[in-house]
Each structure stands twice: as C-alpha cells, then as structure tokens.
Image (cartoon, helix red, strand yellow):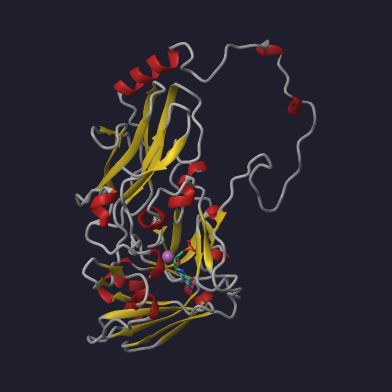
Amino acid sequence: MTNKTTPSRRKFLKTALAGAGAAAAVPLSVKADEYVTPSMTVPGKTFTPYGMPSGHEEVKRLLRPPGISPGTGGSLSPLESLEGMITPSGLHFERHHNGVPDIDPKTHKFLLHGLVNTPLEFSMDALMRYPRVSRMHFVECGGNSGANAGSPTPPQLTAGGIHGLVSCSEWTGVQLGLLLDEAGVKPEGKWILAESADAASLSRSVPLAEAREQGILALYQNGERLRPEQGYPLRLLMPGWEGNLNVKWLHRIKVTPGPTMTKDETSKYTQSQKDGKAKQFNFIQPVKSVITRPSGMMTMNGPGYYEISGIAWSGHGKIAKVEISMDGGATWTNAEMPGPVLPKCLSRFRLPWEWDGKPVLLQSRSTDEQGNVQPTRAAWKAPVSVVQFYQYNAIQTWQIGADNTVKNFYV
Ligand SMILES: Nc1nc2c(c(=O)[nH]1)N[C@H]1C(S)=C(S)[C@@H](COP(=O)(O)O)O[C@H]1N2
Ligand SMILES: [Mo]
C-alpha cells in the first residue's frame, strides 16, 4: 500500500496535534517501566478452530424488518463502524428475496445451456478445477440509499442505516468467458439469463459481450468459500453492475437471443421518469461516496482535531477524486486517497480537520475516471418520478451542530 502523506498533511497534523487540547492523548500518568496491565498477570485463552471478533466489540448488521415472508428483506453493513475498504464477510450486507437456501455443494450443479454448441453441466468439484481469478469489488443494491430519495424529510439514521446496502470483498472464482467458450456460443446468442436455486428463483438478463468479458462465477469471498448469505456455493459476479443481477446460489445460465424480461427486470429495478415512462436495464451502479466518520447519529467531542473519512465507489471504474465541503457545497477541498484505489471497488478517503465548534454542513462529492460526478439531491431528483429510488447516488449532507449532534440533512 502506498502512503501519499503530503508535506502539507504532515504540517497540519503536527500543528493540530501539538495544540493544547487538540490531541486526544493525555499526559503520561503512570510509571511506564513499572506499569503492569491485568492481562499480563494471567495466562491467555487457548485456541479456537474459527475466530470471532473480540467480545468487547458489538458491531452488527442492521436488520431490516422482514417483508411478506420471513426471509424477504435485508440487512445493512454498519459502514460507520468499519475501516479500510474490505467488508468483513460476517458484516457484508444481505438482500434476500426468499431467504437463504441451504445448498449442499456435493449435489449442486451449474448448467450452461441455450444457444451453445455443447450444453454443459458442472459439479462444484469440476468448477474447482478451472483456473481462478481474484478481484476486489463492491456489490451495491440498486435500492441502496433509497431512504434519502423517497423520504420528504431526512431520515435520522446512521451512515449504514441509510447507505449500508453496499459492501466490498475479495472475490475468487472462474471467469464466465472461459466456460462460455468451452460450450461454444452460437452466433444467435446475444444475451444470457442467469437463474438462482433459491425459492425466489431470481433471474436476470445480461448482454452476452459484457457477461463474457466481466462475469465471474465466484466461489470464494475474502479467502474462504462464499458465505451462505452471499450465495454459497456459487454466485454470478458482475463487478460494478446493479446488485440484483449478481445472482446468488447460481444454478444455470442460458444463452438467449435477447433479454428474457423476467419479473426483476420489468416490474422492478427500472427507473420511472417524470413523463411516466420507465427506463429499463440500468445496469451500472453510478459514482457515489459517503462520509462515514463523522456521520449520522454520532456525537462530536467538541472542538478540536478530527479525521474525516469515508468510502467512494463507481461501477464505471476507479475513483479519480473525492472533494469535501464544510459549507453545504459552496466551497470544496480535495480529500486524500491514500490507496489502494481499484476499479469498481470501495476506496477510502481521508481529510485531517480542525473543528472550531461552529455548525457545519459536511459533504463529500466523488468523481470517477470517466468523469462522472456525484449529483446534488435536487439534480438527481429532477428527471425522475417522485416514487423513483433505485440507483440514488446524490451527495450526502451531514449537519454538525454546535451542540455536537450529527444529523442527516437535505440542502
Ligand atoms: N438468488 C438470489 N440472488 C440474489 C438475490 C436474491 O434474493 N436471490 N438478491 C439480489 C439483490 S437485490 C442484491 S442487492 C444482491 C445482494 O447480495 P448480498 O446479499 O450478497 O449482499 O444479491 C442479488 N442476488
Ligand atoms: Mo438489490
């Protein structure tokens, strides 16, 4: 990892941290050479076959109330409590349309058929013998941040409570193109249909060219086999594409002449416009960012030094820059991107900040390598119907009050 700490940042930190009351540390109060902590006086615990977080930590996913059936709904990643760019597997957000199936990898089959020369059937053991690739990518639900789009007044929730339907993992699997080539796609084959083995039988259409180039049949997540919640034992990963078409518990791909027009791409995941028409197949998750620290529902510790930090991402590629505003978008400063900054991956940004205790409207605005810029809420809402909330990527404002509160705010 590169550390691009600039001279100006070092100077800022030196000044900020040297100022009386600015640093968080207190003067040494014990004799350091003689200081014995309680943990030094008793033997430690023994070993466990599978590790868990410290019992002192209580970082959890936020469960959304179930919908029409118990397994319908989701859980959100606690973005405000996480650091870096990778989401721990146990805190990856979940979105299930009919619960988490229990699938035995010994009997699960992946079928590749339709407009191919040789329809193929793969056991999981067979798939495990193919060459693999590892990539770090986010998955974001098309409905993420929808509360900010739909609610006329800003919902008072945490950063994760509003924006937590995004997570990022290292995914390892087999490139879909390899298997499509093995089956031999017929010239009439222009799209694929990917279908799942859960009770929702979720299925989505993807254009063949992109599926072949970008699609990964993911077997591993953060170094271990996929979590059941993320699609064990097999998931289609379309990096940067709308969460919904990253089909979990994948059991077949059919090569088709055109889109199949499934329920998930006709009645849902479309974008209704002001004129009453709906845009279909909005595949790519747009450029976005959110400051996770400080963020909604947090309490400031009064004036002094803070590090502003958050995550930025785009389905179109790498993040080029993130700007920070303290005055609701009137003026902007570039945040630091210490890296790594990878395509279609969460990227961490940081900015050292000395808060004078006065009210602030804190915002981040990201730009991706294709020049897409995060819009204001008003600009995002202008072309779409009032009920539209999919792929909401407007700038998030946190209102910091002189009373130390941090609130969700619309400018
Ligand atoms: N089989 C199946 N695949 C699915 C879903 C589902 O309910 N069933 N949900 C989709 C939706 S809407 C999203 S946003 C992502 C969520 O992935 P995650 O639960 O791993 O975070 O999976 C997609 N793939
Ligand atoms: Mo989703």
What residue do we see at 65% from left, 49% from top? 51
What residue do we see at 27% from left, 75% from top? 207
Q: Relative to residue 79, is residue 24 depicted above or below?
A: above
State the image coordinates of residue 203 (x, y, percent, origin top left). 41, 78
Figure quadrant of residue 238: bottom left
State the image coordinates of residue 282 (x, y, percent, origin top left). 28, 67
| Total count of labels | 0
Figure quadrant of residue 325: top left
Name the outermost residue toward the front: 152
Most foreground residue, 288 or 129: 288
Most foreground residue, 116 or 374: 374
Q: Report whether residue 291 is seen.
A: no
* Residue 187 as seen in the image, left or right of residue 170: left
Q: Relative to residue 229, is residue 177 depicted above or below?
A: below
The quarter in which the N terminus is drawn is top left
Most foreground residue, 80 or 396: 396
Most foreground residue, 33 or 129: 33
* Residue 270 as seen in the image, left or right of residue 159: left
Q: Relative to residue 286, is residue 78 depicted above or below?
A: above
Q: Report whether residue 152 is seen.
A: yes
The quarter in which the C terminus is drawn is top left
State the image coordinates of residue 327 (x, y, percent, origin top left). 29, 32
Figure quadrant of residue 392: bottom left
What residue do we see at 59% from left, 75% from top? 103
State the image coordinates of residue 404 (x, y, percent, origin top left). 48, 29
Q: Relative to residue 134, is residue 108 depicted above or below?
A: below
Name the outermost residue toward the right: 42
* Residue 78 as seen in the image, left or right of residue 386: right
